[in-house]
Amino acid sequence: MLPLYVDLSGKRIVVFGGGTIAERKLRQILETNVESGEITVEVYSRDFTHWIEETREKGEIQCFRCDLRTQNLEDLVKGAFLILVCTDDETLNTRILKAAATFDVLVNYRDEGDAFMSSVVNKGGFLISVSTRGKGPAMARYMKGQIMSLIEDKEEKMLQIQTRLRRYLKEEINLEESKRRAILNRVLNDTECWAALDAPVEVAEKRILKIVEDKFKTHK
């Protein structure tokens, strides 16, 4: 299994089912796609959770109330990049999988699909996925909580500063990649740099830049 991050910009996602499982997966998709382009999300079900209905009213997704057992599933699947199978009807789910098999589409459905959604840490600019490959979902959720507790105000500030420092070293100092990487790593392992993060991020950035120039001999 290869863990990948996929840019969903411009992609069409079809969700079969409008219950709590569909809601959980939709929340993850929408929350992790904030900085990407627009996506098309279609949800087909007889009923929808309150959150799904609210999200539809905001224009973030489209909902189609229907009895999937009477629908032409191939027509719904055709053209989709990803489908999420979230109904509690096993016979219907089997039909959906069969319809999906005739198209070049990613399928998320328990361990029978080819696209799996892990527990995700989305905090402070970090996007970290945690998976046990289905062996222990509760353990994945536990590890998600452990990782989230490690990301505090200083880590968020450091990420912002690292992003700008990386650009500064590349575009203004014009350092080659190996030297940029070495300096960025030294900043992460420098106690004085971490201590500077007690100040507001704008002040901390100036202090860290001064440390970089003095300690690591980088000047324009």
Image: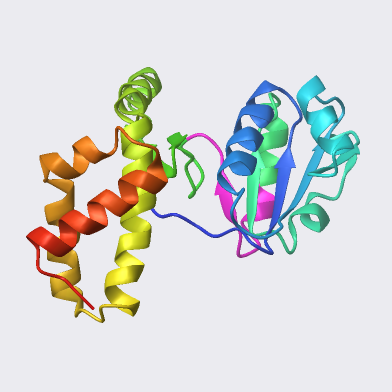
Residue 141, image x and y in percent? 40, 22
Residue 106 appears in the figure: yes
Q: Give the residues in magenta.
A: 97-110
Q: Residue at x 26, y 50 (%)?
A: 207
Measured from the top left, where is residue 125 in percent x and y? Answer: 44, 44
The image shows residue 24, relative to residue 2, as above or below, that is above
Q: Looking at the figure, which quarter contains the C terminus? A: bottom left
**Where, by quadrant of the figure, is residue 204 drawn?**
top left
Q: How many marks?
A: 0
Residue at horizontal 61 percent and vertical 56 percent from the top: 101
Which of the 4 image quarters holds residue 17? top right
Q: Nearer the viewer, residue 95 or 130?
A: 130
Residue at the spot x=20%, y=35% of the render?
A: 195
Left or right relative to 46: residue 199: left
Which colour scheme appears in the figure?
rainbow
Q: Nearer the viewer, residue 175 or 101?
A: 175
86 sits to left or right of 178: right
Most foreground residue, 139 or 148? 148
Residue 1 visible somewhere in the drawing: no
Q: Is residue 66 magenta?
A: no
- Residue at 68% from the left image edge and 22% from the top image edge: 20
Q: Position of residue 109 (x, y in %)?
A: 56, 38
Q: Position of residue 188 (x, y in %)?
A: 18, 48
Q: Is residue 103 above or below residue 142?
A: below
**Residue 136, above or below 43:** above
Judged left or right of residue 45, residue 85 is left
